[in-house]
């Protein structure tokens, strides 16, 4: 996964500058090794999704115990960045920024252009941490199949280093990025079975009812105006399957 690659490259960069850090940086490249090993979201042991199990339970199921250990570390730090991969997407920040000014101030320190309001699904690390007044967010990065993108990995590792500068963990120039804020993501599904062919690219701004793709010649339309955060490549799909996601522009 590209998120693991970014974390690995980031760690290598940190080792070269650790003596100049004005604080401590904790990196967990793979939070759920067993699930990662078998390319699954849920544990083979208890069937639970680690990122729906926070804050966990000290004496719960194995996944809940694992979540509890990560939670004990996370709740003590000042900032939490949770790196995720989102398939055929544009990079974006996912955060509960709308009514939480400390989160919004944190978001502004991250050099990623697009910011999407989280639906606040319980059990996610960043959601539960935000509810405890922690500065916490997710960065979603593209993942095209199982291959790794070394260029992307280096680019986002450098963005994390710049984030340290912006947060005064590291000396250097603060560099802000003009960001665009979006409301909660809406998934676009197909009601048809067959070959999906995209007609718009990820990152495109589309209008309501605009055709974003077709399945066997039948149109898939945008439910409202907004940015296409993600859209699948040509692929065979089934009824009810997600083919894209969209979010409305909200403004800063």
Image (cartoon, rainbow, N blue to C red):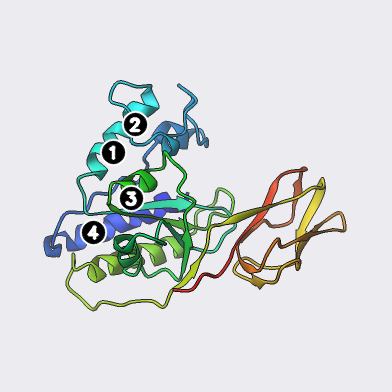
Instruction: Give the residue drawn at x 47%, y 28%.
Output: 48
Q: CA distance from mark 1 to mark 4?
A: 23 Å
Q: Secondary structure at mark 2?
A: loop
Q: Nearer the viewer, residue 167 or 250?
A: 250
- To which residue does mark 1 refer? 71
Tell whether 116 sits left or right of 62: right
Instruction: Compare marks 4 and 2 and give the one earlier in the sequence.
Output: 4
Q: CA distance from mark 2 to mark 1?
A: 7 Å
Mark number, residue 14: 4
- Pointer 2: residues within 10 angstroms few (<14), some, or many (20+)? many
Q: CA distance from mark 4 to mark 2?
A: 29 Å
Mark number, residue 130: 3
Mark number, residue 56: 2
Mark number, residue 236: none
* Mark 3 vs mark 2: in front: 3
Q: Nearer the viewer, residue 37 or 94?
A: 94
* Mark 1 vs mark 3: in front: 3
Q: Secondary structure at mark 4?
A: helix
Instruction: Give the residue drawn at x 16%, y 54%.
Output: 24
* Mark 4 vs mark 2: in front: 2
- Pointer 3: residues within 10 angstroms few (<14), some, or many (20+)? many
Q: Is residue 50 above or below residue 156?
A: above
Q: Secondary structure at mark 3?
A: helix
Instruction: Give the residue drawn at x 55%, y 48%.
Output: 146
Instruction: Give the residue drawn at x 28%, y 46%.
Output: 132
């Amino acid at each position: 996964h590209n998120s693991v690659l970014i974390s690995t490259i980031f760690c290598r960069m940190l080792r070269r500058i650790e003596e100049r850090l004005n604080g401590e940086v904790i990196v967990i490249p793979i939070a759920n090794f067993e699930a990662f090993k078998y390319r699954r979201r849920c544990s083979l042991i208890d069937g639970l999704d680690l990122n729906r199990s926070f804050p966990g339970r000290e004496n719960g199921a194995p996944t809940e115990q694992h979540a509890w250990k990560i939670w004990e570390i996370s709740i003590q730090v000042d900032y939490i960045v949770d790196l995720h991969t989102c398939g055929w997407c544009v990079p974006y920040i996912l955060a509960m920024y709308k009514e939480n000014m400390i989160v919004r101030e944190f978001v502004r320190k991250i050099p990623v252009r697009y910011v999407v309001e989280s639906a606040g699904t319980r059990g996610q690390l960043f959601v539960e941490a935000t509810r405890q007044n922690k500065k916490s967010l997710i960065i979603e990065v593209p993942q095209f199949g199982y291959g790794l993108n070394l260029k992307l990995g280096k680019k986002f590792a450098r963005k994390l280093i710049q984030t340290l500068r912006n947060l005064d963990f590291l000396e250097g120039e603060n560099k802000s990025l003009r960001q665009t804020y979006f409301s909660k993501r809406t998934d676009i599904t197909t009601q048809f079975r067959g070959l999906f062919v995209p007609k718009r690219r990820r990152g495109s701004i589309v209008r309501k009812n605009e055709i974003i793709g077709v399945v066997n010649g039948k149109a898939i339309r945008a439910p409202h105006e907004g940015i296409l955060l993600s859209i699948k490549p040509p692929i065979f799909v089934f009824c009810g399957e997600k083919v894209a996601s969209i979010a409305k522009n909200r403004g800063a």
